[in-house]
Image: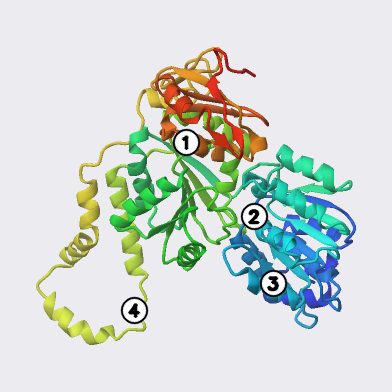
Amino acid sequence: MNKFQELGIEEGLLQSIETLGFTQPTPIQEKAIPVLLQGTKDFIGLAQTGTGKTAAFGLPLLQLIKKEDRFPQALIVCPTRELCLQITSDLEKFKNKKAPVSVTAVYGGTSISMQIRDLKRGTHIVVATPGRLIDLIERKAINLEQIHYVVLDEADEMLNMGFKEDIEFILKNTPNRQSTWLFSATMPPEIRQVSKRYMDKPFEITIGKVNEGNANIDHQYYATQHHNRYEVLKRIIDFNPGIYGIVFARTKADTQDIAEKLTREGYDIDAIHGDLTQQQRDKVMGLFRDKSVKLLVATDVAARGIDVQGITHVINYELPDDVEVYTHRSGRTGRAGKSGISVSIVTPKESYRLRQIEKLVKTKVHKMDIPSGKDVCRKQFFSFIDKMLGADISHGEYETYLPVLREKFAAVEKEEILQRVAALEFDRFLKYYENAADLNLRDGGKKGDRGESGVRGASRFEQRDTQGRKFGGGGSYQRLFVNLGTKDGFYKASFLQFILDMSDLKKDVLGRIDMKEMNSWVEIEAGAAKKMIKAIDGKNYRGRKIRMNDAESGGRGK
């Protein structure tokens, strides 16, 4: 018996999902479906991405919809175009073919007039990104008066992207909803506030622990100096011949720079960032999905909603400032029961963040030795041999060439043939790695794992005084106050990018950033503080005059 039937899923939907191989519900599906099928309870489901959330809310929605009423009855709001299309595709696969339900996707980056035309034809379920949905509401092109069910999928991602006000606007414009279903990987305070304001005694379930990392992911890090990051990245890629993954960089300039360098060196790689048009982004994602491109370099914002199966590695070129972002990055691998690896390249200056990440994901981040040049060549060589031995020779007319081959190689020993094959394949690798340097941190770097300064996680390269300011390898730090905070739509990563873009400084000069609702405090190397203040103080942001000054001498403190 199909276990979904025991949860209350009707026969027509059972037939559809059985053809997809769905017989055993995942934990989130098992706990959510019976509650959601009631159609009257508000619901909060906390679970990592890749745990089957789309079916958890999609199957109940498809069953609850009144097929005879061809107007929007359910609304699914999600952060990105990719996720919007993915959910729509999944619902099309799930739905009962005998009693069809119409599903319409509305999202930015494509013609709004065509989407308005689709809505006018009549639909049951609308899957939407916040911005495009609000455009449609303001144009009076969509009527949400009869929406009974609202699903907020990847709610934490939407808040991270600054959609809090949009979500509240949407909820205010669905006054007759019978239930609101919120799905999220984490539960930051902002989401809790939204749930208290717009949900009535929600039924809440948690799969695993809030913020906890996927148990199928092995978390690793490589410790090195900042100037060796790119070389370490190459070693990681070269040491994993079958890699299919995403490299996360902090800025769009970094993504482009990394992708261009690796492309010039012969790697199958491309980048996605905010400067790409929707057409360019779709092209890159298409190449990545069909594995024509094996590696994707992305910023956190550009990667929102990417749902690609089979990713083996996530590589953090730099650790994110907001450690919660780490769980979103690592969650791109280890999906659907498969294992995955999350790798971080960590400098001494970032070592304290490892402790924060371990605390967040409730698991150990394992320190790995950066492979030597010989290790890389050996790994590549054995991979090539396995690939050669596994090559399919059954379909070509290779036997017609055998007489010529036997004649050509008659005087050549087998061992020499193998050596010549290896030389052709590995000449570039062998030359490149012949005198490769050891990129591992030695001596003091190893002490950075736990620290010997009396401050846990601070290495000899990065120690703290009693006020929490850093000193050591990067020089003394100055603490600046700025009258911008989370209320202005910032989270740590976007705020960091904003102040770096404004001041034209490198991120290496920055230390800790503390953000509050109305204000923030920035640690910066003393020598760069004046430049940042001069670049930012007095400028305008959304009609507000920015005030930045020294927090210790005349600025506001905590």
Residue 21 locus on image (x, y percent) = 67, 72
Of residues 551 and 251, which is closer to you in this image? Answer: 551
Which residue is identified by label 4? 393
Asked whether residue 364 is in view, the answer is: no
Q: Is residue 8 above or below residue 480?
A: below
Ranked by sequence position, the earlier of labels 1 and 4 is 4
Ranked by sequence position, the earlier of labels 2 and 1 is 2
Give the residue drawn at x 51%, y 24%: 523
Which residue is identified by label 2? 79
Report the side of 26 relative to 553 (left or right). Answer: right
Residue 398 locus on image (x, y percent) = 27, 83
Residue 158 locus on image (x, y percent) = 66, 50
The quadrant where residue 92 appears: bottom right
Ranked by sequence position, the earlier of labels 4 and 3 is 3
Give the residue drawn at x 29%, y 86%: 397
Q: Is residue 233 above or below residue 348?
A: below
Is the C terminus in the top left, top right, bottom left or bottom right quadrant? Answer: top right
Which residue is identified by label 1? 502
* Of the two numbered discs 4 and 3 in the rendering, the one whose residue sits closer to the viewer: 3
The quadrant where residue 67 appears: bottom right
Q: Secondary structure at mark 3?
A: helix
Give the residue drawn at x 27%, y 46%: 374
